[in-house]
Image (cartoon, grey):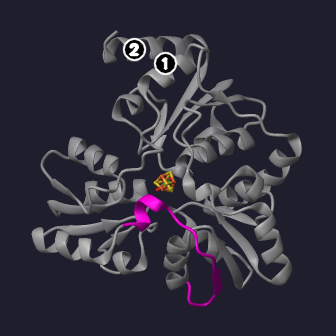
Amino acid sequence: MTIKEIQEEILRLKKENNICILAHSYVAKEIQEVADFTGDSYALSVKAKGTDAKTVIMCGVRFMAETAKILSPEKTVYLANSTAGCPMAEQMEKETIEAVKNMYPDYAVVAYINTTAALKTVCDVCVTSSQAVEIVKKMPEKNILFIPDCNLGDFVKKQLPEKNFMLLSGGCPTHAKINESEVIRAKEAHPDALFLVHPECRPDVVKHADFVGSTTGIMNYAKKSDKKEFIIGTEISILELLQYECPDKNFYPLSKDLICSNMKATTLVDLYKTVKGEGGEEIILDEETIKNARKCIDKMIELGE
Ligand code: 13P
Ligand code: SF4
């Protein structure tokens, strides 16, 4: 079968079986083309909550499928490729955070959405990169324990000097491996380009940015800008999507290493098998985990609106 034929079959089967396909902007383009919705982590959470479909297939990583299940426990939720995890989401154990909470009871725990369902059960509110500053700003608590991404935490901390932040050392291996010298090299090679960066990058990278935002934030900024050249400091898919959508502009990668192998793990064939009921992994979470993890996701959506 050709890619086109597989895509047509996926479209036919998802309509026939009332399936909603959600795809993160980092996954392969041929998957995004057949998805009902594509976007960043926040937008995917909101869509997962709002869809009428009885089955949701997440093309992204495990925490995204778990978030969809937590928000729609009555639906059947599949992760299209069961090996697609986010290493950052696995970095902190629930027990570690419970111990830190006991030591610092006056700190509210803010969890990046890139966390396991189990860890979310002991957090006060979730955030995504697109909403983190606004949400933490709206929180009544002054003392904030921000987990697990210390780079995103540092970015939020710098925007909100009125709060006290405690950061633990965690982060995205894909974004955090980029260093300042790569920024300097990219800017020297493209002196007229604006530098757009994801806040999962290290502070010495982020400090050079003309714009800091989520994947969708970066895309919207580049599309609306009058400027013609941009250095893209996030996963390579965003550069490819932008170049495709804005052929009159030029996009340069901050680094060719900005590839998340987990986001690339899902193939169109994985999705096809899942739509046919022959693949993917059904996300099963116990009622207690769903109930307790949901509080901090609902709070994110409430404060993020
Ligand atoms: P956003 O989708 O919130 O930009 O986050 C990027 C990411 O790394 C997802 O895992
Ligand atoms: Fe996780 Fe980073 Fe990949 Fe996003 S880009 S899924 S944070 S490893």
Q: Position of residue 89 (x, y in %)?
A: 61, 56
Looking at the image, which is closer to me, 71 or 202?
A: 202
Is the CB atom of the residue marked by disc 1 within 8 angstroms of ligand 2's nearest atom?
no
User: How many circles with numbers are drawn on the protein?
Assistant: 2
Q: Position of residue 134 (x, y in %)?
A: 57, 71
As shown in the figure, which amino acid type bears the numbered disc 2? Answer: Ile
Residue 114 in the figure: left or right of residue 249: right
Judge left or right: residue 125 versus residue 34. Answer: right
Structural distance between the alpha carbons of marks 2 and 1 = 7 Å
User: Left or right of 84: which side holds 192?
Assistant: left
In front of the other: 187 or 46 = 187
Look at the numbered disc 2 and give the secondary structure of its residue.
Answer: helix
Assess whether mark 1 and mark 2 are in contact (beta carbons under 8 angstroms).
yes
* Residue 217 x, y percent position in the rendering: 40, 59
- Quarter of the figure with residue 149: bottom right
In which quadrant is the N terminus drawn?
Answer: top left
Local packing at callout 1 (Cα closer than 10 Å; few below 14, some 14-19, many 20+) is many
At a point 62% along the width and 69% down the height, the residue shown is 135
The mark that comes first in sequence, 2 or 1, is 2
Give residue 272's mark.
1
Name the residue that disc number 2 marks.
6
| SS assignment at label 1 | helix
Q: Is residue 169 magenta?
A: yes
Confirm if mark 2 falls within 8 A of ligand 2: no
The amino acid beneath tag 1 is: Tyr
Q: Is residue 214 above or below residue 191?
A: above
Report the magenta residues as a range.
160-177
Vertical placement of residue 19 versus 218, above or below: above
Residue 5, image x and y in percent? 35, 11
Q: Does residue 187 appear anywhere in the picture? A: yes
